[in-house]
Amino acid sequence: SVFSHVSLFLTDTPTTEFYTLPLHAALPIFFGVVGPEWDALRKVFNDDLVRARAVNRLIDPNQRVVDIGTGTGILALELARLGIHVIGVDGSNRMLDAARKNLADDDLVPEGLVEFRSGDAHALPLEDGEVDAAFAHMVLQYLARPEEALSEMCRVVRPGGSIVVVDFVQHELVWMREELGVKSLGFEVAQVRQWISDLDMIDLRIRVEAPAATGRDLPSTFTATARRRSA
């Protein structure tokens, strides 16, 4: 608890000496003691909520995005905490049930900002140009026809809108197919570039990142961004 941490702080720090220190000298000592537990301590003053509200001021409240393959809604909720209207789409009803529960349990998401829809990434349940941006995070590798999903992403964003695609670079880690059920073992960056270029998107950028050290062999990831040409 907070009180136990404060107690520990006071025990480890000579109280009289500490309180006679100037603020600039006392604060480093305090944070040096509680540093590892700061994430727990800051919850006392609802820091997550306060930070979300502050960041929200930087976001256009009229933005609408679709999170394709939303799963349990993790990305959708993160975006909604920033004040963005999110439509989460998934083909699994069990995933959508979990996403709706996570939404109900999340106190940081403003009411009415998230909607979940059942649908296929190859034929999104959205109108043409319905959203400002489309996200597909680790989704293409599960799809039979990823190039069609990219075309759908382009269709549902407005002219000038953006698509963001994150997935694995082509690899030979067969365990992912066996354990995670992926259909593709990543993608060649050149192939992704060609798929998106064929859609007449502009400002195409693809960035490749080495895997983070997790103790298990993982492939590199790519992030592809592009904008739909304005009318």
Image (cartoon, rainbow, N blue to C red):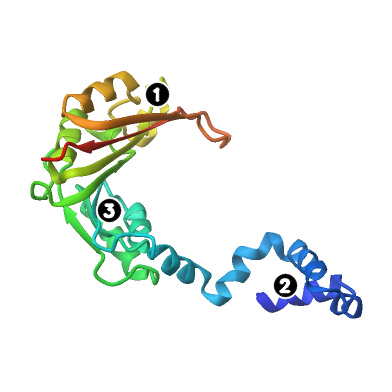
Q: Quadrant of the C terminus?
A: top left
Rendered location of residue 120, percent (x, y): 15, 43
Q: Which residue is found at the position 80% from the left and 65% from the top?
A: 29
What is the number of the mark on residue 174? 1
Q: Secondary structure at mark 1?
A: loop
Labelled disc at residue 95:
3
Left or right of residue 100: residue 50: right
Going by the numbered disc 2, the residue's amino acid type is His
Q: Depth check: give the residue in front, 199 or 48.
A: 199
Residue 25 pos. (x, y %): 82, 67
Can residue 78 be seen here? The reply is: yes
Q: Are marks 3 and 2 in contact (CB under 8 Å)?
A: no
Q: Amino acid at mark 3?
A: Met
169 displayed left or right of 92: right
Q: CA distance from mark 3 to mark 2?
A: 38 Å
Element on which disc 2 rests: helix
Of mark 3 and mark 2, the one earlier in the sequence is 2
The N terminus is located in which quarter?
Answer: bottom right
Residue visible at 24% across and 47% down in the picture: 133
Q: From the viewer's perspective, is residue 16 above or below residue 165?
A: below
The residue type indicated by label 1 comes to: Val
Residue 145 or residue 150, whichever sits in front: 150
The residue indicated by pointer 2 is 5
Label 1, label 2: how far apart the Cα atoms are: 46 Å
Residue 144 in sight here? no
Residue at image coords 56%, 37%? 214
User: Which percent across, then down, holds residue 105?
Assistant: 37, 69
Instruction: For marks 1 and 2, give the one nearer the viewer.
Output: 2
- Position of residue 162 measured from the top left corner of the image (x, y, whole percent): 25, 42
Q: Could you say which is closer to the camera, residue 53 or residue 210?
A: 53
